[in-house]
Structures are given as structure tokens and as C-alpha cells.
Image (cartoon, rainbow, N blue to C red):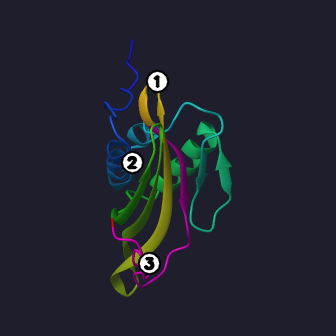
Amino acid sequence: MPQSPPKAALLASPDDVEAQFYEALREADIDKLMAVWADDEEVVCIHPGGPRLVGPAAVRAAFEAVFANGPVHVQPDKVRRVHALSAAMHSVVERVALNTPDGARTGWVMATNVYLKTAQGWRMVTHHASPGTAQEPPELVEAPTTLH
């Protein structure tokens, strides 16, 4: 009897989940990608310019369609993290390598990844990516006003 693929490796932190998520995109590995998602009917994924996908089946179908075109050559950059005891939010600038008729180009996508600590370890519950740009988006950072 064939064995089902293993779930995720131990995902001990939101950073572990994020690393496996982007690795799965670069490898076009749907099982590895789905292993980072929480087993919850309310998980949400929004691809750039796409509809809101709710539930694991909708998320899986969307990524299967993406992977039909091959791996996604994406690298997370400039990660901003907000962590609490059992929840975390990462704001990520995704650097995407694109093949265009004019040759290789780089696109930039702003994404938000939300993680929850579950009985199975940390898992993704939301991935929301904005439409991409041809130039790296600026980052406006407010300087702290209080010195501790």
C-alpha cells in the first residue's frame, strides 16, 4: 500500500514555516506546500490580483494551477515580524525572477503571511500577496521617538 507523503517537518517557529513555504514554491512541491497550512476550513490565500480562496481545497487547487507552469522562482526579502505567544504576522517583500520576451527580469510582490501555533506546531493560516511591480517598492520607516 503506498504511503502518503509526510506532513511538514517539525515547524518549531513561524520562520520555519515561512522557509518551507518558499522552498515549496521554488520546488513546485504541492505536498510540501500544503503541509505548512493549518488544518482549518478558514485558511485564506489571495494571489496577486486574484480572488480570496478560503479552505485547504481551494488553496491547493490554486497552487496546483500555479505549479502547472513550473516552479515559482521567489525569494522572501525584508521580512518584518510581529510575534505574540501563539500568533505571528510577517510582512514580506517577495523578489520574483521572471522570464519575459525581453529576457530575465525581477518582479516585486508585497505579501503578508499569518501563522498560528497549533497542536501540530506553527502553521500558516493566511497568505495575501499584492499585485507585483517592476521595481522594488520603497519602505517608509518611522524613526522611533522614544529612547529606552
Between the C-alphas of marks 2 and 3, the distance is 30 Å
Q: Which residue is mark 3?
A: 142
- Give the residue type that dot 3 points to: Glu
The image quadrant of residue 54 is top right
Residue 63 position, x and y percent, is 51, 50
User: Which of the two marks, 2 or 1, is nearer to us in this view?
Assistant: 1
The answer to whether mark 2 and mark 3 are in CB contact below 8 A is: no
Please report whichever mark, 2 or 1, sits nearer to the chain's N-terminal start.
2
- Give the residue type that dot 2 points to: Phe
User: Which of the two marks, 1 or 3, is nearer to us in this view?
Assistant: 3
Question: Dot 1 surroundings within 10 Å: few (below 14), some, or many (20 or more)?
Answer: few
- Give the residue type that dot 1 points to: Ala
Q: Which mark is residue 18?
A: none
The answer to whether mark 2 and mark 1 are in CB contact below 8 A is: no
Q: Which residues are magenta?
A: 123-147
Q: Decide which of 126, 117 is in the foreground and name it.
A: 117
